Every structure is written in C-alpha cells, then in structure tokens.
Image (spheres, rainbow, N blue to C red):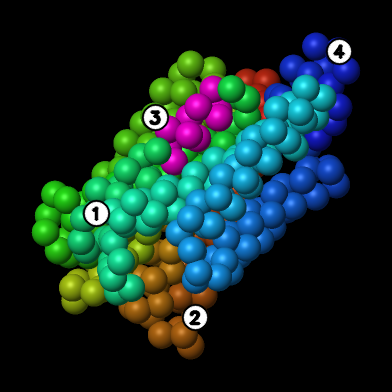
Amino acid sequence: METAGVPPPASAARSERVIPAFKPPDILWYFGAFATAFATFEVITKIPDSQRDLWQLLVALAFFAAFAFASFVLLRTWWIPGGLTAALAVAMVPAIGHGFTSLIGTYPKDVFFDPTQNFSWSVFLIGVVSIVAGLVAFALTRFSFILFTVVLGISLTVQLLIPGIHHHPSADDHLVAAIVLGAVLVLIGLMLDAGGRRRDAFWFHVGGFTNVAVGLAYYSAAPSGNSERGWIPMFIAGAVVLVCSAPLWRGTWAAYGLLGFYAPILHWLTNVLTADTAGRAWLLLAVSVSIFLLGFGLARSGRWRGRVGAARIDA
C-alpha cells in the first residue's frame, strides 16, 4: 500500500513513495476508493431502461472525466489520492466499453449469454482496452496500485479469450489457462524484481499466485474424482514457493507458499487419521511449530544480511 502524506520537498516525495505506512489517511483513502467504485457502478446499473445504452455511456464518460480531472489535480500535491482517483478512472473503462458496444449493437443482447463459453469480440476488446488504459494510467502516475487493475484485467480477459480458441471450453480449459497465466504473471513479477521495481512486482506476484491457487483448489475439490490432481501439485508448489521466499525476501511468496504447503498436509492428515487420533494432533503440532521456528530462522538470516529493514518495505 502506498503511503500517506503531502510531499513538500522532492526528496520527501520520493521517500513517501517508498516507505509504506499503515496510517489512518491510507485506510480512509483506499477504503473510500473501493467504496466509490462500487457505488459508481451501482449508479450506472440503475439507469432507467429508456435510452439505457446512450445514458450508460454518457454517465460512465462523465464519471471517467471527473475521476481523471481529480487525479490530475490531486497528483500535484497528494500522490496517493491522486493515484487512487486515476485507478477509479480506469475502472470506468469497462462501463464505457459496455455502453459504447451496446449503443452500436455489437454487445451480445442475450441475457443468458456467457462470455466464458461463447466468444465475443466486443467483450474481449473491452477487456483489452481496459488493460491498456491501466497501463497508460500507471505510466502517467507511477502509482503501483493501478497495476492491480491491470493484473485483474489480464486475468479476466484471458478467460474471455479461451472460447475463441476452444468452442464451448470445459472447466479444465479455463483452469489450465489460469495456472499457465499465473506462472507467466509470477515470471513478470520476478523480472520486475530483478530490475529493482519490487513495489510494481507485488501485484504480479499476487495475481499470478491467485490464478494458480484457484486452479489447484478446483482440482483438489475432486470434480473429476481424483483430488490428488490438485493436492499433490499444491503441496509441491507450496513447498518450492515457501523455500524461495527466503532468498527473494518476499512476504507474498511466504504467504502463498504456506497456504499451499500447509493445506495439503492438513487434508491428508484429516483423511488418513480420525479426529480422535492423538497422532494427528501431535503431527499437526509438529508441523505448526516447525513453521513458527522457520520464522525465527529467517529473522536471524535477515539481520545477518541487513534485510530486516527491507522486509518492512517489500511485500
């Protein structure tokens, strides 16, 4: 999360963009931005049916212009609210695209239309334009949170592309695409890390691991009758990510690695040993304590390498 504050001198402005803080203004700004986005979409969806397409487009454009102007003004003195209003402007792009394509008659009219099963160029291009808008906004503001909208847009748009490749794709098609995309997003995050852009890389790590986690969680639910299709890869991936979190010094890797490592262990112990078995309780205790002790080991390693301060900066 970017930090709060008014940056009077240039040096202070740079430090405000690097050192994170969990301050009341941050909480209010970010929560207010999310709440504003939801409320704005609610206003757009409540437009009367009479001339709905035209008015939806005009209202969405008005909100976009208002947020873009607010961002232009705020970025001169208040970087965080300026960046958040730029993110709100990006969030209006799908609504603008929906209104425009509906107005020209290319958006699917069927109320039961499923864009994940039937390909639509209009829906797909709305996703592409939204991604481009996010990248442009980030290039103008250098506000890392906007990359959240970019990664989210990429994740959704790839799923919209699958029906264009496979007619009426199966759940496997979508989940394999999510896992592959997740790996690609994590790789992009690592390249940004290597370039010293760790704050920007954060959202690619989060988006990438979330895509992988969704895919593996689906397979571990055993829709095909074999839950090990999900649990075994989840355990292996979780262990690898957890181990790599130490040299990379990434909290996101540690968090996702722990989830991927611990959940399969809990699943296997629960299925192999009954709840009233003392052995299961002792094994769970041993695993839990070992994770806790691993934290001590990493803390000592961090002090030895002089990276404890970096741990508060990088997620």
Secondary structure under tag 2 reads helix
Q: Earlier in the sequence, mark 3 or mark 1?
A: 1
Q: Position of residue 226 (x, y in %)?
A: 19, 72
Mark 3: secondary structure: helix
**Disc 4 to disc 2, how far (Cα)?**
62 Å
Residue that sits furthest to the front in the current view: 51
Q: Which mark is residue 120?
A: 1
Q: Residue furthest left?
A: 167
By secondary structure, the bulk of the magenta-drawn segment is best described as: helix
| Amino acid of disc 4 | Pro
Look at discs 4 and 2 and give the one toward the viewer.
Answer: 4
Quarter of the rendering containing residue 213: bottom left
Q: Which residues are magenta?
A: 130-139
Q: Quadrant of residue 312?
A: top right
Name the residue beneath numbered marker 3.
188
Question: Which of the pair 92/103 is nearer the observer?
Answer: 103
